[in-house]
Image: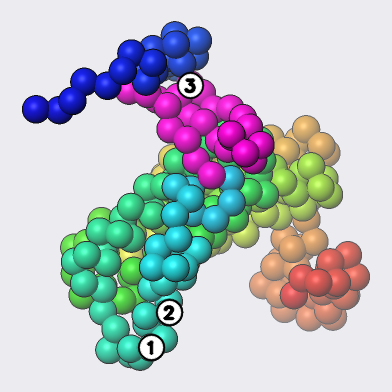
Amino acid sequence: MARRRSQSEHLDDHFRKWPFDPTGISVRLVLGADKRDVIQMRIDLGILQLETTGRPDGSWPNGFETYHDYLIHEALNAGDDFVLNEEQSAEADREFVQYYHRRVCWLALGNFSKAVEDADHTLGLMDFCRDRSADEQWTITHEQYRPFVLFHRTQAAAMAALERSGAEEAIQEISEGLEKMRSVFERYEALDQYEDDELVARLVETRETLRQKHDVGKTLQEQLAEAIASEQYEVAARIRDELNRRNPGRR
């Protein structure tokens, strides 16, 4: 029989002061006992607390910052024969869930660059699991969420770009995200579903809303794509030069 804890260890006051709101995502950034920032997310059964750096639960799996890092280390040592076992698959699932929660928190808090970082981590882990799992059904179960992760990443990247550089770059981030989502549908022979997908429609709507609100015509990337499609290679070269001038670190 479990020992009854002291009355002072209950969480009633915390829950009463921060009631659960079923209509939205309740997230806050607070100071931990050692004055570090931590994220708290109110859910119907309690409060989740997540670290803002490293792995969300603050652990170092097998001495590595994330379980993904550990898996990469193991694969490098084992070579091409490395295949995820059942325990490793379960641990990868734990990390997927943790990063999902924090990604949602960052989006709610408006810290879009952090949301992009966590989405990229998840996508990298998804790539690893897809390539190193022998369980096809397990892989498919995870791959079905790839468009959703890309949707979050594209949203976050666009909002970060809007704050940093303006609407044209934000629109371009959405266009690039849509192309990545399209490639996923194509990879799994579901391209006929792409145009009608809800997430795709929401990104297109956001892009066109930004275009109208900020009076942005075709972006340089869109002009470049049209020039290449119409075989106007001299025009395409000039547009590339302008893109490189504007974004010297981006190729």
Label 1, residues with CA under 10 Å away: few <14, some 14-19, many ≥20: few
Q: Which residue is mark 1?
A: 77
**Quick one: 157 or 76, which is closer to the camera?**
76
| Residue 190 magenta | no
- Disc 3/disc 1 C-alpha distance (Å): 45 Å
Under circle 1, the secondary element is: helix
Residue 191 x, y percent position in the rendering: 39, 60
Q: Which residue is mark 3?
A: 24
User: Looking at the picture, which amino acid does disc 2 mark?
Assistant: His
Residue 60 x, y percent position in the rendering: 45, 60
The answer to whether marks 3 and 2 mark residues whose Cβ atoms lie closer than 8 Å is: no
User: Looking at the picture, which amino acid does disc 3 mark?
Assistant: Gly
User: Looking at the picture, which amino acid does disc 1 mark?
Assistant: Asn
Residue 161 x, y percent position in the rendering: 75, 49
Label 2, residues with CA under 10 Å away: few <14, some 14-19, many ≥20: few
**Quick one: 105 or 167, which is closer to the camera?**
105
Examine the image and state in which quarter residue 178 appears. bottom right
**Quick one: 45 or 163, which is closer to the camera?**
45
Q: Left of 95 or right of it: where is 103?
A: right
| Residue 46 magenta | yes
**Quick one: 195 or 49, which is closer to the camera?**
49
Under circle 3, the secondary element is: loop
3 over 171 or under it: above or below: above
Which span of residues is magenta-colored? 24-51
Residue at 42 percent across and 14 percent down: it is 15
The answer to whether marks 1 and 2 mark residues whose Cβ atoms lie closer than 8 Å is: yes
- Disc 3/disc 2 C-alpha distance (Å): 39 Å
Residue at 63 percent across and 48 percent down: it is 114
Residue 151 x, y percent position in the rendering: 51, 48
Q: Which residue is mark 2?
A: 73
